[in-house]
């Protein structure tokens, strides 16, 4: 499967327009599965038929989380406005859920991180309902059966790419409503456990550089995914 077949499915509008679209789905009781795509999941797709099926499924909406995905779409002449990050989408959806007294389920991160985020949300939004489970204990499929039985309005899964997306996709038929999003390490930032990159890095789409500077062990992963990804995109062009 050519890489541009996946990229053709990526949402090309603005972040604000997608936040509105996802927020409306949450409040209107629609079912929406959003994939926050970075090069890693797209590179995995040609090696894993399950990921390939997920990215091509009409049940999944894909947004360009990584700046390399945005650049790739530009190289291929596909319509794209800007990067739409998982952490910003999660923050927008949590705000909508909180202000409208909706139910949320958080799955992922360390116990102290996810419990801190749940406590923060309950304190900030008295009418919200928050359930959670950390990302280290228990059978994730059993946990997801429990989540489906609760039928929450918003499910955020922070287990890393592509495990979080594959988990959601496996259980998606059990949901008749709810916005479900894989959000990677967003719980660390949203809970206040870890600081996001300074604004200058966010505005210039160089958060990846900040993270590598803080955690040099990320360099190999960056090379294997982002650099090789853009090389494949140029071949596709």
Image: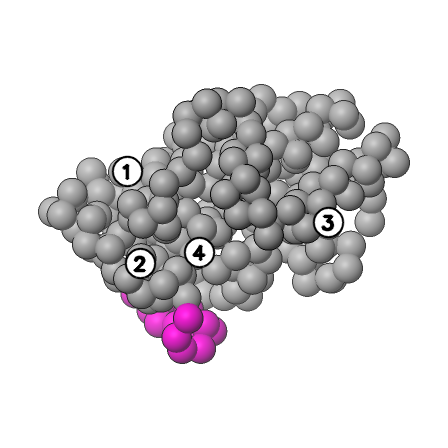
Q: Secondary structure at mark 2?
A: helix
At x 22% / y 43%, what residue is drawn? 98
- The numbered dot on residue 96 is 1
In three-dimensional space, the C-alpha distance between marks 2 and 3, rounded to whole angstroms, equals: 29 Å
Instruction: Tell which tag, 1 or 3, sits nearer the viewer.
Output: 3
- The numbered dot on residue 158 is 4
Q: Which residue is mark 2?
A: 114
Q: Is residue 67 visible?
A: yes
> Dot 1: within a 10 Å radius of its alpha carbon, few (fewer than 14), some, or many (20 or more) residues?
many
Q: Name the one closer to the observer, 130 or 175.
A: 130
Q: Name the one closer to the observer, 201 or 237.
A: 201
| Image height of 116 relative to 144, above or below | above
At x 52% / y 64%, what residue is drawn? 167
The tag earlier along the polypeptide, 4 or 2, is: 2
The question of residue 215 being in magenta is answered with no
Report which quarter residue 52 is drawn in.
Answer: bottom right
In three-dimensional space, the C-alpha distance between marks 1 and 4, rounded to whole angstroms, equals: 19 Å
Q: Quick one: quadrant of the C terminus?
A: top right
At x 59% / y 52%, what residue is drawn? 217
């Amino acid at each position: 499967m050519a890489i541009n077949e996946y990229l053709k499915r990526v949402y090309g509008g603005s972040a604000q327009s997608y936040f509105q679209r996802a927020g409306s789905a949450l409040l209107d009781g629609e079912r929406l599965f959003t994939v926050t795509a970075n090069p890693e999941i797209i590179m995995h797709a040609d090696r894993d038929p399950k990921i390939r099926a997920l990215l091509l499924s009409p049940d999944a909406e894909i947004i360009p989380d990584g700046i390399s995905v945005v650049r790739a779409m530009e190289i291929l002449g596909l319509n794209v406005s800007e990067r739409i990050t998982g952490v910003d989408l999660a923050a927008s959806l949590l705000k909508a859920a909180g202000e409208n007294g909706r139910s949320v389920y958080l799955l992922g991160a360390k116990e102290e991180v996810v419990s801190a985020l749940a406590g923060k949300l309950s304190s900030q939004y008295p009418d919200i309902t928050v359930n959670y489970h950390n990302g280290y204990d228990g059978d994730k499929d059993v946990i997801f059966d429990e989540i489906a039985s609760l039928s929450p309005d918003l499910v955020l899964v922070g287990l890393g790419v592509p495990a979080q997306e594959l988990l959601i996709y496996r259980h998606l038929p059990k949901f008749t409503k709810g916005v479900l999003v894989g959000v990677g390490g967003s719980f660390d930032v949203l809970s206040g456990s870890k600081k996001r990159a300074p604004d200058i890095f966010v505005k210039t789409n160089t958060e990846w550089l900040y993270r590598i500077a803080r955690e040099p062990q990320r360099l190999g992963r960056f090379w294997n995914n982002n650099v090789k990804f853009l090389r494949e995109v140029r071949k596709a062009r």
